[in-house]
Structures are given as C-alpha cells and as structure tokens.
Image (cartoon, helix red, strand yellow):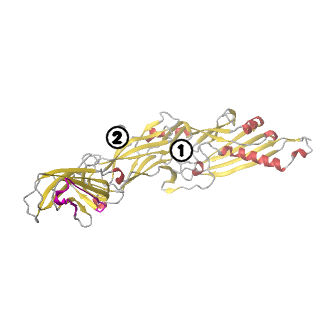
Amino acid sequence: MKHFYNPLPGFKLKFKTIVLLFFGASFFYSSCNKFKDDFDFNKMVKPSWNPEFAVPLVNSTLYIADFMKDSSNLNIVSNPDQSLSFIYSGDSILSATAGTFAKLPDQEFNFPQTFNLPPLLPGFFDTINFIENYQFIADTINQRIDSIFLNDGLLYISGQTNLNRDNASLKLTIPDIKNIETGKALEIISVLDNPGGQSSVIYFDTTYQLDDYKIVLNQLGDTLRNSITFILDIIIEGDENPDLSPYEFVVGGSMTSLEFGSAYGYFGKYSLAFADSLEIGLFNDAITGGVAIGEGSVKLTFDIHNSIGTPVTFTAQTLAATSEFTPPYLVDIELFGAGVPNEFSINSPDINHIGENVNTKLDFTQANFAEAFNISPNWLHYNLQGITNFGQDSTVQNFLLNESRISLDVDLEFQLFGSLADLTIQDTVALDFNNNPDEIDYALFRINLTNGFPISASVQAYFADQNFQILDSLMSEDNTVLLGAPTNGAPEYRVTEPKNKVTDILVEKTKLEHIVNSKFLLFKTKLSTSQQELIKIYDDYAMTVKLGAVVGLSIENKN
C-alpha cells in the first residue's frame, strides 16, 4: 500500500456535514460589513437603492482527504488497485517487564540441631557435619526454577550455640549458589570462639551480597523440587573445657530483595493485561441509519512482538464495537465464529534466540464485522490478557530476562467498500455574525456540484439561539444537493461518469434576521448509495464545487 496525501493542504472540510455549502454565508456577511465601512451611503442623494451584486465565493476541486477531520490515529492509504482504505491505529501497549511480574519471593530458613562432642585431645581438630535441604519458595503453582542469574539480592545468616570451646568456627557452604564468573560455591565462615566457656550463648550473624551469583536448582539426583542444599561444618579444636554434650546449635537466615537478570526453568502462569479503546472517527457524528460493508472489507490486525521465553496465549476478556446512537449499541467481536473463544497463541523466542523479539502478526477478516459496522461504531474496545504457559505443561523449558516483555499494536482497516442507507449525521457549529442585516433584502446562493463520488447527500441546517431553540431553517425541506455518480457494478464498483446538480437556496430578509441573531448552526445530513448498492472509493475520485451568491441590498438615505 502507498500513502495517500491531501492534495489541498490546509483546506479541511467535513464531508459528513457538507459544511462547504454554507461557507459562503459567513464570507458574504464579513464582506458586506467591510463594504459598509468603506462607503458612507447616508451621503447619497437617492433615498433608496436596490442593487444586485453577483459574488463568486468558491471554485475548488476536493478529494477524499479534504473531507476528513485531522485525526492522530487515522491513516488513509491507497491500495494496489487504487481503492482507498482507512486504517485506525491504537497506541502501542507494552506489558510489564518479566522482572516486574515474575517475582522471586523472599526466602526464610531455620535449621536447629543438637550434637555431642567427639573425644578430642587439646590441639587437635575435628569437624561435625550437617546437611540441610531448603525448598525455595516459588511464585506460581508448579513453578520449576532450574537456574537464576541474580542482578541483586541479600543473604543474611544468623545463629547461636552454647558450645564452650576456646576455638571453633562454622563453615557454611551452599553448593547451589555459585559465583557466576568462577563457578565456586558460596562459603561463609562464622567465628564461634568461647574462651574458657565464659559465655552461656555465642551469637553470630553476617550478610552477603548476591549480585554476582547464580542459584542452580533441580540438578540430577535432587529428590525435592527447587531445593537448596546447606552444608554446615562445625570445626572444633580440643581444649581443657568440660564436655557439656549435648550442645544446641541453630542456623537461620533469609534471602531478600532477589532480582534476576535471567532465569531458566518452568515459570507457570502469569497474566499480562492489554486494555485500550480504538476510536473509529468515521462515524463519530452518526445518529441513525445503516452501513453495510462489502465482504472482506474490514480487517483487524494484532501486531505483537514478544521477547518472553515462554509459550503465550492471548484471550479476550472484552472485544467489542460500540455505538453511542445505534441499537443494539454494542456488538461483541467473534474472531473465529459464534461460540468460539477469542483465544490465539503467539510466537515466542527459543533458547537460541534469547534477548530477541519474535513477531506475530494476525489478520482477522472473517469475524462478524458486518454486524459490528451495521451500528456505525464509534469505538473498538479491547481487554486482552496474555497468559504464559496457558497449557500448563511443566515439561516445557522457559526462560525469562529481566527486561523481557510483550508489545501489542492494534490496527482496524476499513477498505471503503460498502453501502449506505440514510446514514444520518448531525453536527453543531457555533456562530458569531455580529452583523446588521437591515440593508440586505435577500441572498440567493447557487451551488453547482459535479460529484465524482457514488454517494448522494441531502442536507438541512437549522439556526438556533443560545438555548438551542430553533429560530429558522436554511431550506424549506431536506434538499438533495449531491447526486451520487453511477458505477459499473461488481467487481470494480467504479464510477463511470460524474453527476452534476445545481441547487439554489434563497435566503430572504426575515430569514436573514434569524440567521444573524442565531448562535448555533445545527446540521443534519443523510448519506446514501443508490438503491443501497455496494460502492468502492478510489483515490482519483473528486468533487468540483462552485458556490456563488446574488445579493440584493437596500440602502436608505437618512438625511
């Protein structure tokens, strides 16, 4: 597709309200005011004068882009066959990063022991050994953590004993916590000296930063899932102090503020929210009427980039088109047909593509868009959940990086292919004429439209005061000012020749007084295709607008 650019920059009109038809009115009033300022008609000899002025106001050729409001989320594109599409794009939504949604809970452990001293001569050493297994607290059900490379974390070890040896120490070895660079297991030495057994209890504690370490779990031979092994070696030197066996010994501690740089294993189910609303500005002012779309003319696209190394399934909590005016006001979008859940899986990077974004682009054209567009929707609402490991297969190998995340972009493309049945659009424009119509007898506007679009339009405009009370209408009845050009039918539905229509609108003095005193102009426009037939809009379609006025003035001498 190629971009379609506005051939008349800065001249934006509202096709939906045919504002152009009334542009000449304000132009004319401002011109009359300047005309009066430049000439003092009171000094004229004749008591009255009734001239007519023919004023050309507009002579322009307009394309589709000139009829659209500026919209930050709308892109008009030309397809290979020169037909046009409107693409409404939502803001890119980013999920939380893996380091935010996948937590490493704080861990706490406590190992109480009792032991007897072996026979030991003064000056000789012996070691009393204990092995403890601690099950790492997981964040989700069935989570299997094989390895964690830590960015941050704090290990706190504390304990106490009533051991009464002159020289003793504790060597705590945690073989499952290894230095990332050297691969050496973490070792912590605590002093347990109690010379002469003077203290009834010896206390010890230490803290250790874990930001250069990895935790390796679920190794071959482990009988407990996610278990960490603690090896406690109490090293004792013989002395003359009495043997008071059995001795009590307690080691406890915690691992807190754990943050992973990367993690491997099976991480279970996490839910990531992607909720937003996409404005469909095409129907913003529609109040009634029908829209029927051609087959395959609407396409909903989800463009998803994923760097999370787990299977991810999307499920829709909400996916619906809504209209403010047209019943039933809300239509649920069924991507795969009635009764089929809105669920789909996306691609994920494998272990060979760690740190890379993997793209999934899904185009849906066969959903119930015909039903949704029949209500002239103003919004597409979506609340999607991206769920990791939706199938709960714990044999799958996952990985997470701290900054892994998913991004979602939503586009709704509408190829301008369909039909209209009295699609009625209403709009309000504030007025501020500040003019005196006393010297104006009448104004006759002639609108000459050569329409290259296959759409007919009838228009009515009402003038209202500050309380929106109707003062007058511009025309005696709804007037078809635009005749739809004929087309050649399927499959191109191309216009065969433009259609011309000349419309005269007479505005007499009483109506002019109402117009000048009005504060608001209320438009009501009905758009239709001939006999509700299907049409397509092409990038070379144009409308030529010629607008002129004949103005009758009455200028009286007050001398």
Is residue 540 visible in the rendered image? The answer is yes
State which region is magenta. Answer: 185-212
User: Residue sitting at 71 percent across and 46 percent down?
Assistant: 24
Residue 228, magenta (yes or no): no
Query: What's the residue type where badge 2 is placed?
Result: Pro
Q: For the C terminus, give its image quadrant.
A: top right
SS at badge 2:
loop
Q: Position of residue 186 (x, y in %)?
A: 23, 61
The residue nearer to you, when weighing 514 against 387, is 387
Q: Quadrant of residue 125?
A: bottom left
Is residue 225 visible in the rendered image? The answer is no
Check disc 1: other Cα within 10 Å, few if <14, some if 14-19, many if 20+: some
Q: Position of residue 153 (x, y in %)?
A: 31, 57
User: Residue sitting at 74 percent across and 46 percent down?
Assistant: 28
In this rendering, would 513 be left or right of 190? right
Residue reaching furthest to the left: 119
The residue nearer to you, when weighing 407 against 480, is 407
Q: Position of residue 204 (x, y in %)?
A: 24, 56
The residue nearer to you, when weighing 125 against 136, is 125
Residue at the disc numbered 2: 341
Residue 195, magenta (yes or no): yes
Residue at the disc numbered 1: 282
SS at badge 1:
helix
Q: Which mark is drawn over residue 268?
A: none
Check disc 2: other Cα within 10 Å, few if <14, some if 14-19, many if 20+: few
Chain-order first, disc 1 or disc 2: 1
In this rendering, would 405 be left or right of 288? left
Query: What's the residue type where badge 1 is placed?
Result: Leu
In this rendering, would 103 be left or right of 331? left
Q: Quadrant of residue 469?
A: top right
Q: Position of residue 519 (x, y in %)?
A: 69, 38
Q: Tell me how far mark 1 sits from mark 2, CA to CA.
A: 29 Å
